[in-house]
Image (tube, coloured by chain):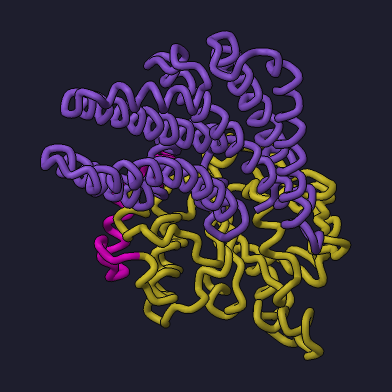
Chain colours: A yellow, B purple
Amino acid sequence: MLESFEVTKKFLGKTAVDSISLKLEPGHIYAMLGPNGSGKTTWMKMAAGLIKPTSGVIKYNNVPVNVESRKHIAYMSTEPYFYDWMTIGDVGNYYDDFFEDFSMEAFDEMLVEMKLEKNLKCKALSSGMLAKLKVAVTMARDAKVYMLDEPLNGIDLLARDEVLNAIIRHAGEDKILLVSSHLVEELESVVDYAIFINNSHLVDVYEVEELRVKQCVSLADKYRDIYGSAEIGGAC
Amino acid sequence: MLNLMKYEFRKSWKMKGFVLCFTAFFELMFLFGVFSMNEDVWSVGVFGLILTTICGLFLIGVYSIHVLSKDINTKQSYMLFMTPNSSYKILGSKVLENCGSVFLSGMFFMALAMADIMILVVKYEDIQGIIDMLGLIITGNREAFTYQTFVMAGLDTVLSWVYLICVGYLAVVICATLLNGNKFNGLLSFIAFIVIAILVDKLHDGLFGVYYVFSSVRLVSNVGFYVVLTAIIYFITAWIMENKLSV
């Protein structure tokens, strides 16, 4: 279980995340939604142990996230982060060297699916290929928590399907999947819960199925309702 | 830790390769000059080797500080900090790899210099006179310029350079953490680097200034002094990284 207790992060007086409390439970896929600059990435980085909260705490299985929790939490940043000198094969070897849960076999399979060749240099890859590589190397881990920050950015429709399929394949009773994206409609069929964040604050967490069945509202409509001015809802 | 060190080496092997290539070039020039009895050629070779030694050790250290800066200030930081390794291990691997590189390079250059001196002694019988003269100029004492003194002085130089590189690491980490967001963080951390270096130099002079520069007491004490200082600077830097660094 991944829990956030009143977590706040300030950068030079600007509040990026303001007192967010959340609980993510295994067996579910969560979407983290919000406009640019709402605090999604900052929260994810704190959960990955890359940045430290100004106040509050994020706990993984009741222990504050630390070096040990990185063994179980697979984080994929939205920006490319591989070393320039690396080839795709080097990236796989690097993960294999550092993560016990990394499967080179699964990585190779995903490379084939995504039509990526191991001898290609990372710095020569297009943004779409880099995005696919990030997903492949992250999902080749058998982690307990996956946090994918904008995994659908910069990739074509078919590649998006591959990424979404990979997400579904990795869902399991003991796993937490958290995906942030602006492509709300594409996530709707995949996620169980949607976490809405606005202006550094948590707006609410909705069960997607409940929204659809009880409130007759799609995830995209709910998004428009929260961040836009459209009126939504009606007869199911 | 070994994996971290492997990748630290991988980040800088090209630059180290360049240094080796230059060394090989000047060594070949030196050998060609000696065996063809062409003093002009071997003199240029010796000059090139001295220059490569100084620049090589300098470059290896400065480049490792640049790599750390890149590793904590760019998106590449995720490659290190999302792995299940503490800052102590991450920084430790950098210090050890760099220490190993500087140490091995230093030893390599010293061994090369000794071998070259021996070749000169064999080839030019009167070269011993030149070495004695060099000893007199460098140490002020002909007897003090022995191979042992040469090795110890080399070891001291290497260790003091490793310590200075660690101070560089500290300055880079202070810049990215305690001074992060400050408009003058680069300048302030550079000033911190200079101040620490000067203070330690004063402390060193206070402790060992009374001993003759090439005396064995001073040479041996220097080794201990710089090892302890390097360890202290490492722990302070790693602590700041572990508790204050956000990437």
Residue at 56 percent across and 55 percent down: it is B70
Residue at 40 percent across and 40 percent down: it is B53
Q: Is residue A118 within the magenta segment?
A: yes
Q: Nearer the viewer, residue A170 or A12?
A: A12
Q: Position of residue A155 (x, y in %)?
A: 44, 78
Q: Position of residue A19 (x, y in %)?
A: 85, 56
Left or right, residue B190 beside residue A173: right
Placement of B44 over or under B166, stated as above or below:
below
Q: Is residue A185 within the magenta segment?
A: no
Q: Nearer the viewer, residue B90 or B52?
A: B52
Q: Bounds of the magenta span?
A: A94-121
Residue at 32 percent across and 23 percent down: it is B129
Q: Position of residue B90 (x, y in %)?
A: 54, 38
Residue B18 seen by the camera: yes
Q: Nearer the viewer, residue A91 or A102?
A: A91
Choose top left, top right, bottom left or bottom right for residue B119. top left
Residue A4 seen by the camera: no
Q: How many marks?
A: 0
Q: Residue furthest bottom?
A: A230
Q: Nearer the viewer, residue B141 or B28?
A: B141
Q: Residue furthest right?
A: A13
Q: Residue furthest left?
A: B36
Choose top left, top right, bottom left or bottom right for residue B126. top left
Residue at 40 percent across and 15 percent down: it is B146
Q: Position of residue A78 (x, y in %)?
A: 56, 67
Choose top left, top right, bottom left or bottom right for residue B165. top right
Placement of A229 over or under A16, stated as above or below:
below
